[in-house]
Image: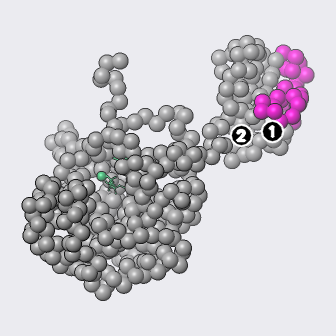
Amino acid sequence: MSKSLQAIRGMNDILPEQTPLWRYFEGTVARLLDNYGYKQIRMPIVEFTELFKRSIGEVTDIVEKEMYTFEDRNGDSLTLRPEGTAACVRAVLEHGLTGAGQPQKLWYIGPMFRHERPQKGRYRQFHQIGLEVFNIDGPDIDAELIVLTWRLWGLLGIRDAVKLELNSLGTSESRGRYKVALVEYLSAHLDKLDEDSQRRLKTNPLRVLDTKNADTQAVLINAPKMADYLDDESRIHFEGLKARLEAAGIPFVINTKLVRGLDYYSKTVFEWVTDKLGAQGTVCAGGRYDGLVEQMGGKPTTGVGFAMGIERLILLLETLEQVPEEIARQVDVYLCAFGEAAELAALALSEKVRDQLPNLRLQVNAGAGSFKSQFKKADKSGALYALILGEDELAQQVIGFKPLRGQGEQQNIAFDALAAHLATCVVQG
Ligand code: ATP
Ligand code: MG
């Protein structure tokens, strides 16, 4: 195939055999978030470039080198969204959703775009489910975000494979004092820092803590710790969060090097990590961003949120073989009809059955075919039962009902009794 007809590197098709697992995952999350009182918001995929520069920060990896930015026909600079928080805050401000200090508990789902090096668990178009909460200040809501993800891991059967890492970045005042101390310490060891860290020391010193370079990591061992610079407000908040996680029985570890890639975090930051996916181990990450809304032109409004990477969680479900068997079966009943008259009767009958059983997954054979070929398709569809309508059955106004997976004998069912019969043998979702 010529190159122009291939998908863009790092941007994947999600094929029919994969979509049942995606829908199971997305459905599980959506139900859970409904139950916790979160409301869905849907934002555009493209925004003004300025939005991401202002919110994520000019000197972050995302803005410096990962964004898909282009000029549209008006000459405006637009960007495919690399994450959801910026657009969510923009929408909240634009529509006054947090006016007069009104709390909001929102969630979104959709594709995000970052020009990174594609590899397992890292793509250029990937999908996130994100939550953002506005105007709730206390550690109770930070805890709720973590508690509900813990419940999600339980529902998905992956609790044993994920670990919660937690840190506090303090208020901007305490973080400011910490930055001064960190820069002073690191500047005294400048020659031992890798090139990236030397650059970050000037632009975004906290990110040096995030380095993968072994020499820089060695320097960091004796570096000042954020925990020693937390002011009372941040400390009380952090203690409150930890107490709630302990009360809920959720294990966590404190990781003092956890700073997150975006500029806007304050106080709580957290990541759920797994060691089952190699280098791309963070499946869900977030934190508090009390200064962001104001920084984007709104009234002071506290915020806290997270985003989970759907591809990584799907990979984890597959790796751990936590894929429920029943999600693969997409057909309950397959109807075979032979000859024009039977096909006409089958169409009328199947529509009547659908009226009575709106959740029945009934596939009617299309494209005619011999008994053998239709029956093969019925079997391949994964259906539990085949319905068979030929000339003989039609003459008697009955339809053959044949279990395909060894559950009982074949029998004839009167047209009028078909829906009632199917209702007794097919569990309807
Ligand atoms: P990483 O450190 O892995 O690059 P990040 O800190 O850039 O992640 P966030 O911006 O916090 O990631 O996004 C939240 C989640 O979205 C991540 O924890 C991850 O699960 C997922 N994610 C981020 N970037 C990608 C990507 N390029 N491909 C697939 N999933 C991703
Ligand atoms: Mg990244």
Q: Residue at x 84, y 41 (%)?
A: 420
Alpha carbons under labels 2 and 1: distance apart: 9 Å
Q: Position of residue 327 (x, y in %)?
A: 62, 43
Q: Position of residue 80 (x, y in %)?
A: 28, 45
103 or 428, nearer to the observer? 428
* Amino acid type assigned to the residue bearing label 1 in the image: Leu
Q: Residue at x 15, y 76 (%)?
A: 181
Residue 161 sits above or below residue 303 on the image = above
Most extreme residue toward the bottom, as rendered?
232
Q: Position of residue 423 (x, y in %)?
A: 80, 43
Q: Is residue 301 visible?
A: no
Q: Is residue 376 left or right of residue 243?
A: right
Residue 85 sits above or below residue 390 on the image = below
Q: Which residues are magenta?
A: 391-417
* Mark number, residue 360: 2
Q: Is residue 334 visible?
A: yes
What is the crowding at mark 2: few (fewer than 14 residues within 10 Å), some, or many (at least 20)?
A: many
Q: Are marks 2 and 1 in contact (CB under 8 Å)?
A: yes
Magenta span contains residue 303: no
Q: Quadrant of residue 417?
A: top right
Badge 1 is on which residue? 422
Q: Earlier in the sequence, mark 2 or mark 1?
A: 2
